[in-house]
């Protein structure tokens, strides 16, 4: 361990917490809500333009750390990069803003420090308040003591970790583009019927469709449609360190299951929830809270089976009638989303009324299975690239998360790491 030139500091010695910024009331500027931060993801996914009425204020390079449970525990900490030079944005009052101090600390080092056990664990342990609304005590965070390297070493630590996150971000952007391409091909084939425009067409309740195709309900093509367990069946006190993973909303952010950190229940507990067990090929839907999320569990998923949460339901296709990939892409199309949310209520907690029976009644254009297979063969190379990028990002995230605590604690020096990488 090479820490001869590291100094024992208070967090407030190298971090400017909630720096003062000025934005006039009513000014239209970029707003970042808590929902815009993705778990354990550096970059902010999106923002909105809104009049400033209050909240945290920040600039590019600042770190936003959630101060409320369970957002902090779920990894909602990000670095701002969505603003123009000298632009000030604002966001949730539940953010703690962290900024580097000129000639003392580095912005990237500050972000990774916020993600490391040195600061993150201390913040989580400091939380006080009523159950479900606990918040970080900023005073405790200010006074957290740890050893910090000199500025030049901070910059190098931040640079090494940033390179890994940059590659993850680039893979994510590429995958978003690839997903749009596949969705565009789906629309061309199955909504606009462009490859079949010279075929004969027949009338249906949705208009003309190619001859030999049919309109069918989800119930017709489903092997099974089922709900997640009642809330009383999965509680925090039933979680274990390893076992059967529980799928929650954070795992349904894209076309396919996002294999992020899971909570687990025991195999015995999972067997008692047998009707809520899902596996590769199943399509998961969210029916309460962040409604309308849909994702397919891919064939190369990490676990043999999962448990869906009480806010979810799932569809298992009869593969002799419909490919899961076809139905998944249908529900990611504008038409499919509209049908899924047609029975949604926005009062109270947003929800889809009678989700299982509603899903079963939805009618879809069903091409012959041979046409579905032909489409899937067409998009398969794109999906393989998408899958390869996802796997690479997971490996890079594992490397980043392994290096992070060792670099921040001084267990691994940047000199040794750089030397090992060049030999």
Image: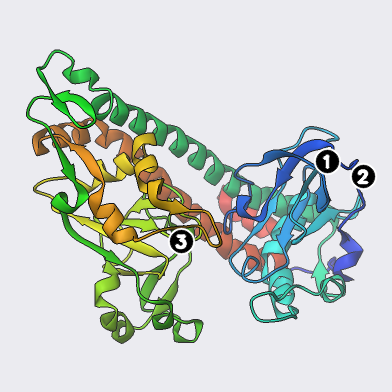
Give the CA distance from mark 3 to mark 2: 38 Å
Identify the disc placed on residue 88.
1
Q: Quadrant of the N terminus?
A: bottom right
The residue nearer to you, when weighing 144 against 373, is: 373
Q: Give the SS element for disc 2.
A: loop
Contact (Cβ within 8 Å) of mark 1 with mark 2: yes
Residue in the image at 34% along x and 61% along y: 354
Q: Is residue 290 visible?
A: yes
Give the residue number, with chain letter if any, for mark 3.
288
Give the CA distance from mark 1 to mark 2: 8 Å
Q: Give the SS element for disc 3.
A: loop
Q: Is residue 186 above or below residue 143?
A: above
The residue nearer to you, when weighing 412 against 252, is: 252
Give the residue number, with chain letter if any, for mark 2.
22
Q: Is residue 298 visible?
A: no
Give the CA distance from mark 1 to mark 3: 34 Å
Labels 3, 2: front one: 3
Q: How is the image coloured?
A: rainbow
Q: Earlier in the sequence, mark 1 or mark 2?
A: 2
- Left or right, 31 with reference to 143: left
Q: Earlier in the sequence, mark 3 or mark 2?
A: 2
């Amino acid at each position: 361990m090479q820490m001869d030139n590291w100094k024992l500091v208070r967090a407030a010695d190298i971090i400017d917490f909630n720096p003062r910024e000025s934005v006039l009331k009513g000014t239209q500027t970029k707003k970042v809500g808590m929902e815009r931060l993705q778990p354990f993801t550096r970059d902010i996914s999106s923002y909105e333009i809104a009049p400033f009425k209050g909240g945290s204020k920040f600039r590019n390079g600042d770190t936003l750390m959630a101060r409320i449970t369970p957002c902090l525990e779920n990894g909602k900490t990000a670095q701002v990069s969505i603003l123009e030079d000298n632009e000030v944005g604002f966001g949730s009052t539940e953010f703690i803003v962290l900024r580097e101090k000129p000639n003392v600390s580095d912005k990237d080092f500050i972000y990774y420090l916020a993600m490391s056990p040195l600061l993150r664990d201390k913040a989580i342990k400091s939380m006080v308040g009523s159950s479900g609304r606990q918040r970080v005590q900023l005073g405790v965070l200010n006074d957290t003591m740890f050893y910090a390297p000199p500025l030049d070493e901070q910059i190098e630590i931040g640079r090494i970790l940033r390179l890994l996150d940059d590659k993850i971000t680039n893979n994510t952007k590429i995958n978003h583009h690839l997903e749009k391409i596949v969705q565009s091909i789906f629309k061309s084939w199955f909504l606009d019927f462009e490859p079949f425009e010279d075929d004969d067409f027949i009338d249906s309740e949705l208009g003309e469709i190619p001859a030999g195709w049919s309109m069918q309900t989800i119930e017709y093509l489903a092997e099974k449609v089922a709900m997640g367990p009642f809330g009383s069946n999965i509680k925090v006190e039933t979680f274990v360190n390893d076992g059967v993973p529980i799928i929650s909303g954070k795992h349904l952010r894209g076309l396919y299951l996002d294999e992020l950190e899971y909570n687990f229940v025991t195999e015995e507990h999972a067997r008692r929830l047998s009707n809520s067990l899902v596996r590769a090929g199943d399509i998961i839907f969210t029916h309460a809270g962040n409604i309308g999320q849909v994702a397919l569990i891919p064939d190369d998923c990490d676990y043999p089976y999962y448990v869906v949460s009480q806010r979810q339901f799932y569809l298992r296709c009869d593969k002799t009638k419909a490919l899961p990939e076809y139905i998944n892409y249908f529900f990611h199309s504008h038409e499919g989303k509209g049908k899924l949310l047609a029975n949604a209520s926005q009062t109270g907690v947003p929800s889809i009324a009678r989700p299982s029976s509603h899903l079963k009644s939805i009618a879809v254009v069903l091409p012959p299975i041979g046409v579905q297979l032909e489409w899937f063969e067409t998009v398969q190379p794109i999906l393989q690239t998408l899958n390869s990028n996802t796997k690479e990002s997971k490996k890079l995230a594992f490397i980043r998360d392994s290096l992070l605590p060792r670099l921040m604690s001084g267990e691994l020096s940047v000199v040794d790491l750089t030397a090992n990488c060049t030999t």
